[in-house]
Structure formats: C-alpha cells, structure tokens
C-alpha cells in the first residue's frame, strides 16, 4: 500500500488504485496524510474541504467521507501495513508508517542527499526524490486554504530540489545536464528568478554564452511586463558574472575529451598498417538541452598539428546503397538528423512503423552529407524484421573489417574480438555507419564504432529505448507524409503531367494510402505499369476497405507483407491484443477499451499497447490514448475475423458501463435510465471518475467514439446496445444542448423502434423532443413528444412518464398552450413524489415555476422554485440550481423587489459561470442587462454568449 500526495491524491494497492470517489474525499485524505499520525480536528478538516462558508451539515459530510474512506482501507487490508483511520474525540487520525507516504519519502531522500560526500551519490538521491513526483501536488482534490498552502509548500520544496540537483551537476562539470533540467522548469515557472539565474550559469559554463544572456533579457522583460519590477540580486549577479567572463567554480572536463595523442600509434601485427587521418575542424557536439538549430562551436586542432598524409592511405570506403529515387518532403526530419549528428560519438535513431520510409530517409541524409565523412560510409541491413532472419553478427563485422582494409586472414573468428578490432580501427576516423532494420539494442551496441567523430545512423520499427538509455541515442521519429508530400511522391514516379491532369484524384490516392510511403510507391508502381488506368479509377478501387490491402501489394512488396514481418516478432498476448484492436469501431482506444476488446484487464492491455507502440503498430497521441493507422487497422482486422462480434460486444458493454459511471458521477441524483441489456458482459475494470468535471471531460472526449460504437451496434443488429450508449450521454446533451445531437438521437430512435422496445422509444423521444425544442423546432418536438408519455405508461415506467410530461409541457408552453403545459407539469410532480424521486420532482418544479412566472403568478413561481431548491444538494446540481435561482430573481423583480431580484440573478449567473454552464449564465445575465445599467453585467453577458457560441 502506498499513499500519494505528489501528483493525484491516491492510494495505490497491489491490485491497483482504490476508488476514492469525489474530490472532497480526496481532500479529506490529503489533509489526514499531511498530518499523518497526528489528530486533525473536524474544524481543520472543514477548512480543507470548503473555501467559503461551509454548509450546515459539514460535520455529517465529513463523517460520511471518513466512513467510506475507512471502509476502503479496511477492504484493502490496510491493517497488514500498519494503517488505521481512527476517531479521537472531535478529531481523526490516520496512522501509517512514514515510508508509505510519498511526501515523507521525498523529504527523507532530500535529507540523505545533503549528507552524501560524493556529488555523484547526491545526484542519485536527488533524482530518486524527484522521481516520486507524478504531477502537481494534491491534484484531484478540492483545495481549501490549508491544502492550497500545503501544495504550494510542496511545490517550493520540489523546485528547491531541482535547483540543488542542477548545482550538483555543475559540481561534476555536467553543465549540459543542468541546463536541460533547468530549461524545462524555467518554462513552467518563468517568473522564478532563482531558476532563471541557475539556468543562465549552467548555459554559460556549458559554452552557450549567447543563450545565457538571451535568457536574462527574456526574464527581465517578463518581470517588467508582468510584475513591474527589475531583476533581483540573484539574477543580476549571474548576469554580471557572465559579462565579466568569470569562469565560476572549476570542474574537471570529462576524460573522453582529453584524447590528444602526440603521434600516431604504431601498427600492430594483428591490424593493418594505418595512419591517422589529418586533423580537420569539426563541430563541437551540442549538449543535452541545446536549443534546436543553435550553431555548433567549432573545435580546431592546435596550430602545430599538421595533416598526416601517406601515399599508402586507402581510398574512403563506401558500402552505401544508392540514394532513394523520388524522395519527397521530410525537411524537418532531415534537419533533426543533422542536429543529432553534430554531437560527440552520436547515435541517431530513426524509428517508425513499417513502410513509413525510414531507410529512404537514412540514405537520403547519408548521400546529402557525404562530405562530412572523408573516411567513408559503412552500411549493413540487419534484417531485424525479415523472414530470412538476421545475419550473424560476425558476418556483419567481417564485412566492415574487410571494407576497412583488414586482410581476410586477420579477421578474428569471434564476434567480441571482431567488434574490438572494429572499434580500434574506427577510433581515429570520421566514418558514417548506417545500421538498417535493427530489431534490438544489443546487436546495435556491438556494431558501434570507436571514434568520437564517427556517426552511427540506426533505423528500426522498434523504439530501442535501451539504446537511448545506454548510448544516449537521439531518436528521430518518423510519421506518415502529409497529403501534399504524398502527391509529390506520386508525381515523382508517374510524372507531373499525369498527376496534374487529375489533381483531386491524386490527393485522394495519397489520403487513401494514409500518407504511408510504401503504400504510395506500390500505388504508383501499379499505375506506372498501366498507362491506360486513370487515377480516379484506382482511387475508387482503394476506397473499398475489403480489398485495399490486396491492391497495395506488388510481387513481394506491400503493406501487408511489411506488417506481417513486424507482427511475427511480437509475443502472443500482444498479437492477440493487436488483432482485437482491428475490430474497434472508434478512432482511439485506452487501456480499458483495449481490455474489453481482448477480454483481459486494463493492466495487461496497457502492457500490450506499450509493446505495440514500441513496434510502431499503434501511436500514443496523448497519455493513455492510442490510435491505429487506417491501413494497420485493416491488417489487424484480418488477423482474426471470427472474433469480430465478440470483440464488438465487449467494447460496447465497456462503453455502457463507463458511460453509466460517468453519468452517475456527473449527475448523481439522476434516475438511471435503463437496466443492463441481455447478455451484458461486465468489464474486468471500469474507469473511476473523481468528480463531475472529470466525468464530463470523458463524455466530451469520447463523444465521437461512442457515436461510432452506436452506429456499429446498429449495423450489427445490437439495437439494445446502440440506444443505451447514446442515451447515457444525457448529461453532456443537457450541458451542450445545441451541439447537434439530433442525428445521434435519431439513430437511437431507429434502434429502439427496430427492437420494438416501448421503454427505449419513450426515453429517446423524451430527450430528442427536448433537444428539438431547444433548437427552436417546437412543432416537430411536440409531434414527437405527444407519444412519449403513453409509451412510458405501456412500459411501466412512471419516472419516464414524468420526464416525458415535463418536456411535453415545455414545448406546449412555447407554443402558447400554457394551461395544458401547467397541467402536464403538475402531473409530473405527482408522479415523481409518488416514486420518491427528488431529482425528477426538482426538474418538474423548476419548469412549473417558470410557467407560473410566464402566467404572471410570481408568488406561486417563487414558492415552487424554493421547494425545488430545498430538494437538491447544493454542490451537485449546479445547472439546475442556477436556473432555479434565476426564476426566484425574476419572481422578486415581478413583485417589485428589485434589490432581491438583482442579487439572486447575479448569484445565479455566478454559479453558472463557475460551473461552466454558459447557457444558464447567458439567461440570467440577459435579465440583468435589461433590469440594471451596471456595465459589468453587459461585459459578462457578452463573454458568456461568446463562449457558448464558440464551444467545441
């Protein structure tokens, strides 16, 4: 068990994080952990959970959260870890070993770091301390004043630790590491002068004086613009030191830079006679954290050093294949390779999916930069993803050694000895070594040259993170081509005339190939051999997903063949996950959805996704969010076509379960709109939403995926899933009612009617009718809503009937049928009270109050609104509470009580603004603008209206 405060407040257990629930419960836990093993009074907890006047039932709320938290800890066997949540009079105490609290471990590591004698050991301790941070302290909690102060204190401690680590790097002479560390923190805290001063000194001592001075002037301007102040002593002193040229504290240069031999080494009996290539000015390597595109510092030999010229020197070796033909685009990637190759002993790593053009990029760069490598260029295809298998390491080394002039009889028989000789021979040369199609880091390491002026260029479908860790390889990820570059590639093969004759079809072909160079070249090859074919005809053929992969294969070359070679190197669990991803109806997937597709759990799914991402079969576009290239998805779908329905049902039921959890968190008083479908497959785990905001963000982010899932369910004859997935988005529909929900709800209506489900049809009609009303289509809404109450009665759904009556009442009132509308609302209130459903009763009373106000009965409107306000919990019903407060305000205005009316309307507008409910804010502010001349109301109204009009 582990308690986390340095990031999202959480309790981690062996089986995963505990579902802590709402933000206030996390706040309670945070307050107890910050004073672990010390009693915390109810008063102190109240201050932590509310930043304004707490509600009268605050003590009861705290008791409820404590009870739930205690139950969660007991269920996680907290006692075995020495953890106990106890009550002590008017206080609570969370007893726990300090080693279980990450904030306590952080402080312990800081103390240990300060006691170390070796700067290297200090660095290790500080890095371990900072690794405990997983985001801003106390995230996910509702931060009252005490928690805000605690979070600020923890952040200050973290920043001080970062500064200490940077200074310790400086003690070791590793100013490039200090600069890289401080650059990221300075970007996040641009007004923190101590960070800026440390960064200036690190840049200056790393030989980057111009960047250091630029940092000072940027910070000076920012301080003046934002705070109106001049730089403080730390910043000013650092600036003065740099201007004086003061070197600062001395630091030993790394041993690798002290290589200045007095004369060439004598040739040994085991190696060919050779002389050192003459010293040539070369670029000083940029250190980690260099600004992209910064000019390199030139390192020149001493004036006494003369180029060594020998008539027996061999000609430069060149094993490089020819340059790729029809190469297009990749300007940014070529520039990135140039920057990466400017370092000392650089290893450049080009990674990307099969067919994206990694080898073409590497060869293009190598041919463009031939002059940088006067001693030659070596090339080896490591065949890491070939059906023929990888070549033996000794065979690759033998080819390299022979190319470097080693007689065949002098080539060692063992790979380690051959690798050692290779490193020795390349120690004084300026070579390019291209290692194509590498599958693992170990093979690459054995083939790295020994010279600091040699460049190694590696291509791989895997990320080779081990090579990044061990040899500081600089990754240059390669993605698909933009449509313009894809069209240019086609023109390079087919000729510009043919492409210019059909520009629209050419661009469509580039899009259907997904920007994948291999697919584009196969397409161009098909067209080049058939001059009678039009580009539009082939585009029509490729538009059919069922045959697209077959069309993109020519002889032994094609997208499917390339993908097959990647997949065959994956473990079975990753292949299983990959095959199931092909049946996902949406555009992106998270570990929960992946687990539902594959019939596993989110932990196993996340591991499989990471492995697939390492092989560039999926791409992580955001933390925990993966996508597949269209052609990759088609290939994955064909791996296990028989599993299509099973996978679809799994992901549909995952969507239903998660949307249920989101709706319950977003609107906890809402009445569940349905029972689960027959044969429902409960997911292994369902996402836990900490508060309403998180639940609404998920519903918004997943809207497209849920719509695609509903359409897939309808197409597969799973109507009972289709309408449920759509209806469960009702909190988002209510929040953004004018956001074009009608087509999706019409799909839900088709599904309900296809399944002959009166319950479903009534529910969908009720929501669709309300949306049409809000869109100004009252007549259409009334025609639909007329049937909804009857269908609900037939289905035995009294609460559904009540909701239908409410929405029918709203549209009737809009059509001028106020008596009928009032009668419908009154009937809805009766049904809700009979079913003891406060949420629906509150909704009915809200609309009844509005209708009484329209009927010029402000006293009755006020009474209904106050009754409704007494029913709902204040912190959960932000939108409805805002609307009810607005009704109360308008009622007071109608009664001539202007001060009370303005006060309540202003309160309604502010609560709506705070909750992000722009529609409610606009309604309340419209009345205020008409009532009073206060200019701030007009400004706020314009801002809310603009947000509403431009909302995504």
Image: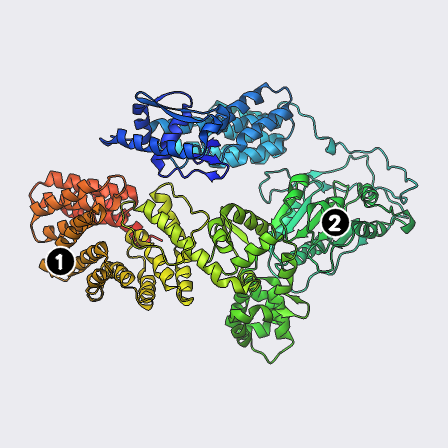
Crowding at dot 2, Cα within 10 Å, few <14 / some 14-19 / many 20+, comes out as many
Is residue 862 found left or right of 768 in the rendered image? Answer: left
Q: Residue at x 19, y 48 (%)?
A: 841
Q: Which comes sooner in the sequence, label 1 or label 2?
A: 2
| Relative to 311, residue 304 above or below | above
Name the spot of residue 393 as percent of width and height, x first.
Answer: 78, 50
Q: Nearer the viewer, mark 1 or mark 2?
A: 1
User: Left or right: 536 with respect to 704?
Assistant: right
Colouring method of the image: rainbow
- Whether residue 582 sits left or right of residue 150 in the image: it is right
Find numbered disc 1 in the image and state the secondary structure of the residue it sits on: helix
Image position, residue 696 (x, y; %): 35, 48
The furthest residue to the bottom: 532
Report the front residue among 262 and 721: 721
Asked where in the image residue 473 lies, by quadrant, the reply is top right
Tell me what residue is drawn at x 42 percent, y 47 percent. 686
What's the residue at 14%, 42% (across, down)? 866
Q: Can residue 788 be seen here? A: yes
Helix, strand or loop under label 2: strand
The residue carrying pointer 1 sits among few (fewer than 14), some (14 to 19) or many (20 or more) residues within 10 Å by Cα, namely many
In the rendered image of this protein, does residue 738 appear above or below residue 873?
A: below
Asked if the residue at tag 2 contacts the one at tag 1, i.e. Cβ–Cβ closer than 8 Å, the answer is: no
Q: Which residue is drawn at 77% across and 52% down?
A: 378
Residue 639: image tag: none
Question: In the image, residue 759 lies at what x, y percent?
Answer: 27, 61
Q: Distance between the residues labelled 1 and 2?
A: 82 Å
Residue underneath mark 2: 432
Identify which residue, 746 or 374, lies in the foreground. 746
Tell me the residue that label 1 is attached to: 821
Q: In which quarter of the image is residue 709?
A: bottom left
């Amino acid at each position: 068990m582990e308690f986390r405060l340095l990031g999202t407040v959480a309790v981690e257990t062996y089986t995963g994080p505990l579902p802590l629930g709402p933000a206030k419960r996390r706040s309670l836990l945070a307050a107890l952990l910050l004073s672990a093993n010390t009693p915390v009074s109810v008063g102190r907890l109240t201050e932590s959970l509310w930043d304004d006047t707490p509600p009268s039932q605050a003590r009861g709320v705290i008791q409820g959260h404590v009870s739930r938290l205690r139950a969660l800890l007991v269920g996680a066997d907290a006692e075995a870890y020495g953890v106990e949540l106890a009550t002590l009079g008017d206080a609570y105490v969370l007893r726990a070993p300090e080693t279980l609290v990450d904030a306590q471990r952080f402080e312990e590591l800081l103390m240990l770091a300060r006691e170390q004698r070796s700067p290297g050991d200090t660095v290790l301790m500080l890095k371990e301390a900072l690794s405990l941070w997983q985001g801003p302290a106390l995230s996910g909690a509702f931060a009252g004043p005490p928690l805000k102060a605690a979070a600020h204190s923890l952040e200050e401690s973290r920043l001080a630790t970062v500064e200490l680590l940077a200074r310790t790097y400086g003690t070791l002479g590793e100013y490039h590491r200090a600069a890289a560390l401080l650059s990221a923190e300075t970007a996040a805290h641009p007004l923190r002068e101590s960070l800026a001063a440390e960064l200036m000194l690190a840049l200056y001592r790393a030989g980057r004086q111009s960047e250091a001075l630029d940092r000072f002037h940027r910070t000076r301007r920012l301080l003046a613009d934002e705070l109106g102040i001049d730089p403080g002593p730390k910043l000013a002193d650092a600036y003065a030191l740099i201007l004086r040229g003061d070197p600062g504290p001395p630091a030993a240069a790394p041993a690798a830079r002290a290589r200045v031999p007095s004369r060439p080494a004598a040739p040994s009996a085991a190696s060919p006679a050779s002389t050192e290539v003459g010293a040539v000015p070369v670029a000083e390597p940029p250190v980690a954290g260099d600004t992209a595109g910064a000019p390199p510092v030139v390192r020149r030999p001493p004036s006494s050093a003369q180029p060594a010229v020998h008539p027996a020197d061999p000609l430069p070796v060149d094993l490089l294949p020819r340059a790729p033909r029809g190469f297009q685009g990749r300007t940014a990637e070529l520039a990135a390779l140039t920057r990466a190759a400017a370092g000392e002993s650089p290893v450049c790593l080009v990674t990307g999916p099969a067919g994206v053009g990694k080898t073409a990029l590497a060869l293009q760069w190598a041919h463009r930069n031939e002059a940088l490598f006067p001693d030659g260029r070596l090339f080896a295809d490591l065949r890491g993803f070939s059906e023929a298998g990888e070549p033996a390491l000794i065979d690759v080394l033998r080819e390299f050694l022979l190319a470097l002039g080693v007689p065949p009889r002098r080539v060692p028989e063992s790979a380690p000895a051959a690798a050692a000789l290779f490193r020795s021979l390349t120690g004084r040369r300026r070579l390019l070594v291209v290692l194509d199609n590498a599958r693992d880091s170990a093979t690459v390491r054995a083939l790295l040259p020994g010279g600091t002026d040699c460049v190694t260029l590696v291509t791989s479908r895997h990320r080779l993170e081990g090579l990044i860790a061990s040899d500081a390889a600089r990754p240059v990820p390669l993605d698909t081509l933009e449509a313009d570059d894809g069209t240019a590639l086609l023109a390079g093969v087919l000729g510009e005339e043919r492409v210019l004759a059909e520009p629209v079809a050419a661009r469509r072909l580039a899009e259907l190939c997904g920007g994948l160079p291999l697919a584009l070249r196969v397409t161009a090859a098909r067209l080049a051999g058939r001059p009678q074919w039009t580009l539009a005809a082939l585009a029509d053929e490729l538009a059919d997903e069922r045959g697209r992969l077959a069309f993109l294969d020519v002889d032994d070359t094609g997208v499917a063949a390339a993908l097959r070679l990647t997949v065959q190197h994956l473990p079975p669990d990753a292949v299983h996950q990959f095959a199931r991803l092909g049946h996902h109806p949406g555009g992106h997937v998270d570990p929960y959805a992946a687990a539902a597709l594959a019939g596993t759990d989110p932990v196993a799914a996340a591991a499989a996704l990471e492995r697939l991402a390492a092989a560039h079969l999926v791409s992580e576009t955001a933390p925990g969010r993966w996508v597949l290239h269209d052609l990759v998805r088609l290939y994955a779908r064909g791996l296990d076509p028989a599993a299509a329905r099973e996978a679809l049902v799994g992901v549909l039921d995952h969507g239903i379960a998660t949307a249920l959890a989101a709706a319950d968190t977003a609107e906890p008083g809402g009445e569940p709109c349905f029972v689960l479908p027959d044969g429902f497959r409960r997911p292994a785990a369902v996402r836990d939403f900490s508060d309403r905001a998180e639940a609404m963000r998920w519903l918004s982010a997943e809207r497209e995926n849920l719509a695609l899932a509903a359409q897939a369910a309808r197409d597969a004859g799973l109507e009972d899933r289709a309408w449920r997935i759509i209806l469960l988005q009702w909190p988002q529909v209510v929040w953004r009612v004018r956001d074009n929900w009608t087509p999706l709800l019409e799909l839900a209506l088709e599904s309900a009617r296809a399944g002959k489900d009166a319950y479903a049809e009534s529910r969908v009609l009720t929501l669709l009718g309300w949306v049409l009303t809000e869109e100004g289509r009252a007549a259409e809404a009334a025609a639909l809503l007329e049937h909804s109450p009857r269908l609900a009665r037939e289905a035995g759904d009294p609460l559904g009937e009540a909701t239908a009556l409410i929405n029918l009442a709203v549209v009737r009132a809009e059509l001028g049928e106020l008596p009928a509308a009032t009668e419908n609302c009154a009937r809805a209130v009766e049904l809700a009270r009979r079913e003891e459903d406060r949420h629906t009763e509150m909704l009915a009373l809200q609309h009844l109050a509005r209708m009484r106000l329209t009927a010029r009965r402000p006293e009755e409107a006020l009474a209904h609104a106050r009754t409704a306000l007494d029913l709902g919990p204040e912190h959960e019903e932000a939108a409805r509470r805002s609307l009810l407060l607005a009704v109360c305000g308008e009622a007071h205005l109608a009664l001539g009580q202007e001060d009370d009316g303005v006060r309540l309307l202003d309160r309604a507008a502010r609560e709506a603004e705070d909750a992000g409910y722009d529609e409610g804010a606009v309604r309340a502010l419209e009345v205020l603008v008409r009532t009073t001349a206060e200019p701030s109301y007009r400004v706020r109204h314009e801002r809310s209206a603009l947000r509403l009009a431009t909302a995504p």
